[in-house]
Image (cartoon, helix red, strand yellow):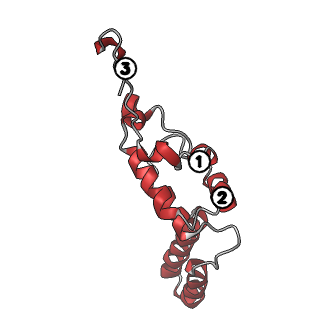
Amino acid sequence: MDMRSRSNESLAALLLARALLDPDLLPIAEEVAARLTEAAPKGRNSPSEAFLRFWDAWPRHPRKTDRAGAYRVWKRDGLDATAESVIGAVLAFADSTDWRKDGGAYIPAPEVWLNKRRYLGADAIGVSRSRPDWGSMRDGEQPV
């Protein structure tokens, strides 16, 4: 639910509460409240359902801002067609040690993550890339 819907619902509730004090206002208040709470038609810039699922899948974090900017990147790259794989990558990254370490200090902003196409390739498949433990290797041994 967006900010406008919440404020319209709040305004509708206030109108109906005021109408309880003045019964003459009740029919008008009911009509206005119904109009305020009607679903607004989806505009050109309204996020798609697929994007909203992506946004909901993204972990709570101070960098989770600028939904409109992330949606611009989403639309530009046509990610509705591959939404499930992008959302799967988000879930994989959210469960990775890279994103969980230090209290999530390394979780990027969604717009940046989409811009850099982090959902593609080996990063999405092998999220927590294992790095060789150079200290435990013998002389001449190669990492696997």
Q: Which residue corresponds to mark 1? A: 117
Question: Depth-wise, is mark 3 or mark 1 nearer the camera?
Answer: 3
User: Between residues 57 and 28, which one lies in front from this camera angle?
Assistant: 57
Q: Are marks 1 and 2 in contact (CB under 8 Å)?
A: yes
Q: Are marks 2 and 3 in contact (CB under 8 Å)?
A: no
User: Between residues 61 and 21, which one lies in front from this camera angle?
Assistant: 61
- Relative to 31, is 76 above or below? above
Q: CA distance from mark 3 to mark 1?
A: 31 Å
Report whether 141 appears left or right of 127: left
Q: CA distance from mark 2 to mark 3?
A: 40 Å
Q: Position of residue 31 (x, y in %)?
A: 59, 88
Q: Position of residue 36 (x, y in %)?
A: 60, 78
Residue 142: mark = 3
Task: Tell me which numbered mark, 1 or 2, is placed earlier along the sequence.
Answer: 2
Task: Tell me which numbered mark, 2 or 3, is placed earlier along the sequence.
Answer: 2
Q: Which amino acid is tagged 1?
A: Arg
- Quarter-of-image position of residue 6: bottom right
Q: Which amino acid is tagged 3?
A: Gln
